Amino acid sequence: MHRDDGISASRYAASKVREGWREVMATIMDGRVTELWVWEISRATRDRPVWATLINACIAQRVKITISGKVHDPNDPDDGFMLDLGAALAVRESAMTSKRIRRDVAARAAKGLPHGKIPYGYRRIYDPRTRALIRQEPDPETAPIVEELARRVLGGEAMYSLTNELNARGVPSPETVRMRRLGDTQSSWLWRQDQVRDVILSPAAAGKRVHQGKVLDGVIASWDPIISAEEHALLAEKLYDPARRSWVDASVKHLLAGLARCGVCGSPLRRTINRKRYGNYSCWGGKGTGCVSRKQEWVDTQGVGKVAVSGR
């Protein structure tokens, strides 16, 4: 028996891996079973492509599907129709649930009500009996930290030194606060510079409501701001200034750099510039006189697949 307790079978929960379901599909594809039992068809899947894969595998391996004790043969036209109909209804119900949730979230956003992760510097108050959210308010422990960081960054202090100071003072980091809410009161995580930046640039700290990644103009948040809108605007202007960029873009820019290998010594190839300003792929290792060096333009357009076995 394989279980996926607590994991949705909907396509709207694609980020959660269903290890139990993977094992079920592997068992079917290997021909190790003749019958698949599920409590109801929606627990198999509520995702059309996944259902298509399952039903095709069952047809190919002649595996019957039993739902609530009733056996269905996917190779039988009538049984196959009922299975497809049940799967379609499960997909529709999942989509309708998602639609209702999105509508509710959008309505809450329009009213300026909180939703999702609790921003650093805030806490949420719940009804002790129903657990319904009552309000979001500045947290007495962490809100002063947000206010202090905003003031000191605007004053010209570097985030590197602020990060080190926060860690030396033992100030709880965003990750530490999050884990405390989940019940882990023993562990702690250090601050990082990007967290300092994110905390003071958070629109929520300035009393702004964000929905689907965008600040909602004209919507007044239901919680009190920690920093003023003017301070938030100054911080954004300061920290989003392109002249402040201190990181190196590590994204891939050349087709085979670091991927292809020298056919002589086996070292990775890198992209170099020769004295005539032409781009080349050259060997990192430099062992011997026969290592690879080829013009990048030729390699990228004609020589892919030949470089690793070619010498000078």
Image (cartoon, grey):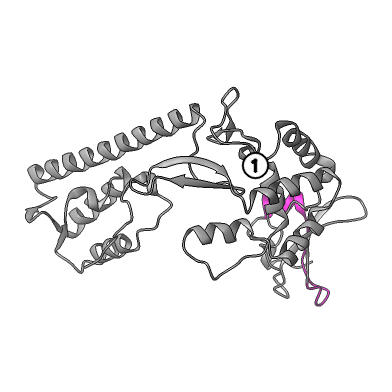
Q: Which residues are magenta?
A: 285-303
Q: Is the C terminus in the top left, top right, bottom left or bottom right quadrant?
A: bottom right
Is 36 placed left or right of 233 in the picture?
Answer: left
Q: Nearer the viewer, residue 211 or 285?
A: 211
Q: Position of residue 249 (x, y in %)?
A: 74, 51
Question: Which residue is denoted by mark 1 in the rendering?
Answer: 202
| Residue 256 showing in the rendered view | yes
Relative image position of residue 244 (x, y in whole percent): 83, 45
Residue pictured at 43% horizontal, 34% vertical? 105
197 is higher (above) or lower (below) than 187: above
Q: Quadrant of residue 310?
A: bottom right
Query: Residue 270 colored magenta?
Result: no
**Vertical arrangement, residue 251 with respect to residue 306, above or below:** above
Which residue is located at x 59 percent, y 22 percent?
Answer: 218
Residue 251 shows in the view: no
Residue name at image x 86 percent, y 46 percent: 156
Q: Is residue 62 above or below residue 223?
A: below
Q: Residue 250 occupies which quadrant of the picture?
A: bottom right
Secondary structure type for disc 1: loop
**Frontmost residue, 221 versus 242:** 221
What's the residue type where badge 1 is placed? Ser
Residue 236 relative to residue 102: left or right: right
Task: Check residue 295 for magenta coloring.
Answer: yes
- Most foreground residue, 46 or 297: 46
Q: Single out the residue that lies furthest toward the right.
A: 275
Quarter of the image with the N terminus in it: bottom left
**Residue at 21% over, 38% down:** 89
Q: Nearer the viewer, residue 217 or 58?
A: 217
Asked if residue 34 lies left or right of residue 204, the reply is: left
Residue 27: image x %, image y %?
25, 66
